[in-house]
Structures are given as C-alpha cells and as structure tokens.
Amino acid sequence: MSGQLITIFGGSGFIGRHLVGRLAAKGYQVRIAVRDTESAAPLMTQGNVGQIVGFKTNVRNQASVERAVAGADVVINLVGILFEKGAQNFGRLHVDAAERIAAASRKAGVAQLIHMSALGVSKDHEAAYARSKAVGEELAKAEFPEATILRPSVVFGNDDDFFNRFAGILSLAPAFPLAGGGESKMQPIWVEDLTDAIVRIIETPAARGKTYELTGPDVYSFRELMEKVLEFTGRKCLLLPVPFGVMRAMGAVMSLLPGRPPLTADQVALLKYDNVAKGDFPNLDTLGITAASIDAVVPEYLRRYRRGGGLTHVSY
C-alpha cells in the first residue's frame, strides 16, 4: 500500500496531527488540505522530504476541494467543529462540505473515502451538532456509496481538548457545574487507537461502505469523568448538579463571548444524551484492536496540572 496518496481534510486538527505521522511511517504520501498551510507545516517533519505537504483548501469552494482530491487514492474527511462562529457553522462544514468532498472524490475516481462522524448522531437530535453530523453522513453516502463512516465517542490523548480543558478548569475553580447532575454516559477512545483503526480500515478493502462505532473499553458518566480528572490531578473541586435549563441559559450567554466560548447551549443539549456504542456496528474488536483505558493513558499527561507540575522534588 506504500506510495499511495492520501488527502486529509482537517488534517491539522487533533486527530489529524496523530494520524499524519502514522500514515507517513507506513510509507503513504500525505496531502493535508487545510485553510492555513502554516498549521500543517509542523507536521511535515514527520515524514521524508516532500512526503507530507500542506495544501491550501477552502472546503466551502468546489474548485478548491476538487484540486485537493485530484490524484488521491484515499480521501479522509476529518472536518468538524464543536461550536459555530460566523461563517464557520455546522451547516457549511458538517453538511455542505461533507457532500462536496464526497462528490468531488467520486468524480476524481478516488478509491476510498473515510468520513468522520460522531457517536449518537441523529437527524432528530436536540443538538444541532448531532443533527448536522447525521445529515453529513447521509449526503456523503449518497454521493459516495462505498464511503466508510467512523463514529467515535469522545477522543482523548496528550494534546486533547477534553481532559486537558477540564483539568485546567478544575485545578482553578472552587466549584464546577454538572448539567443534569452529570449523569450522561460516555465511552472515551484513545486517539492512538482511533488512528490505528483508520490505518487498518485503509488497508482492509472489506471495510469499505461500512459504519464503525469506535469507543474505548469503559463507560463513564460525565460526573465520573470529572472525578477521574480530580483524582489524576490531585485537586479538589465541588461538583454541583445544575438543571439542564439553567445550563442552557448559561451556554446561550457564553456563546456570545468573543473567541472560543467556554460553553454553548448546543453543547449542553449534547450532554443530555448518552454517547456510548449501541453494538449494532463493527468496532475496534472487529479490526483486531484492543482499546486502551483512561487509567492507562490519561494520568501521565494530566500530571502537569498537579501542584508543582507533578514533581516530587526540584533539583538544580
């Protein structure tokens, strides 16, 4: 399989950063299709000279997407956002771009399309994020019937935006609100297991056209995950149950803040529903991957949130 060209949309994001090096090590040529090629520059050192290249691409522009997929053997769509700001909204990125990338891939004769969705998506979901992801899946399959759909739960890893984000908050805040008491369930997956799954899917022709539920080995409530963060960081913080209605109002106000909002009403809506595998689709076991647990991975990279950076002594 070495030498094939793989175009990755959104390749400079969290999952993409871990995937690019893995593919380069396997001998693939990697084209990182991103708005800002500077964001892809640090990833180029993970391969040989010219093996990994940044390719300026606007997923909202048909011609731009067509240029990005031209000549590619495999296309991977990792584009996704958790909140909307201006032109960067769910409809344009999760729906329109998904359809555009799939259609361009089909027309370009791409052999394989892998589309990143999310666990628990539904066209009648309360959260716009989940609705848009569900529609994006449907349109991608309509344009490219043999597309492989990936539905991961929360993804964690040393540079993640989940455990790191909450560890930072919990290390400073005296109290932390839990929407609905934090009872919704999640099944987090390690980013290295997820990227391993993507590589195996690329190299498994029988995986084409299937939908995969990709999760870790354990199910936790959101409250239990926050308790894990406190345990791993050695911090104390009061976890306060707050009604969903109050949290949604808080999220609506916070979404108006400049820059990245700490919380949105749509994110609160997501927390009302479990994010675990239903067991109706193939998974990591199907691919021969044994999933790593949170306990085996997260404590090491959350060490920096401990008092003194987790050091027991300082030497000079």
Image (cartoon, helix red, strand yellow):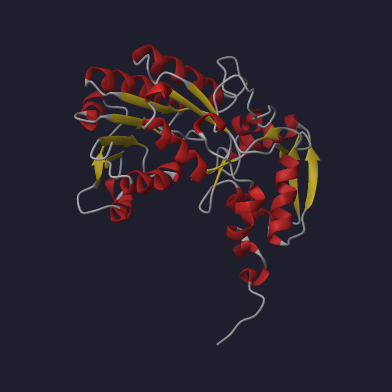
Indicate the quadrant where residue 31 lies.
top left
Please provide percent x and percent y for residue 206. 41, 22
Coordinates of residue 79 in the picture (x, y in percent): 41, 33
Residue shown at 42% from the left, 21% from the top:
95
In the image: residue 67, left or right of residue 281: left
Q: How many numbered dots are placed on residues in this image?
A: 0
- Asked where in the image residue 280 lies, by quadrant, the reply is top right
- The residue lying toward the viewer, choosing from 118 and 71, is 71
Name the quarter where the C terminus is drawn. Answer: bottom right
For image coordinates 49% across by 45% down, the residue present is: 192
The N terminus, quarter of image:
top left
In the rendered image of this protein, does residue 23 appear above or below residue 113?
Answer: below
Question: How far from the left and from the top, in percent, is residue 264?
Answer: 60, 35
Residue at the farthest bottom position: 316
Task: Check the image and name the residue furthest to the top.
Answer: 142
Can the viewer see residue 294 in this picture? yes
Residue 173 visible within the image: no
Give the left or right position of residue 153, taking residue 197 as reference: right
Residue at image x 64%, y 50%? Answer: 166
In the rendered image, residue 294, in percent from the top left (x then y), is placed at 64, 48
Q: Is residue 214 above or below residue 140?
A: below
Nearest the viewer among 97 and 210 is 210
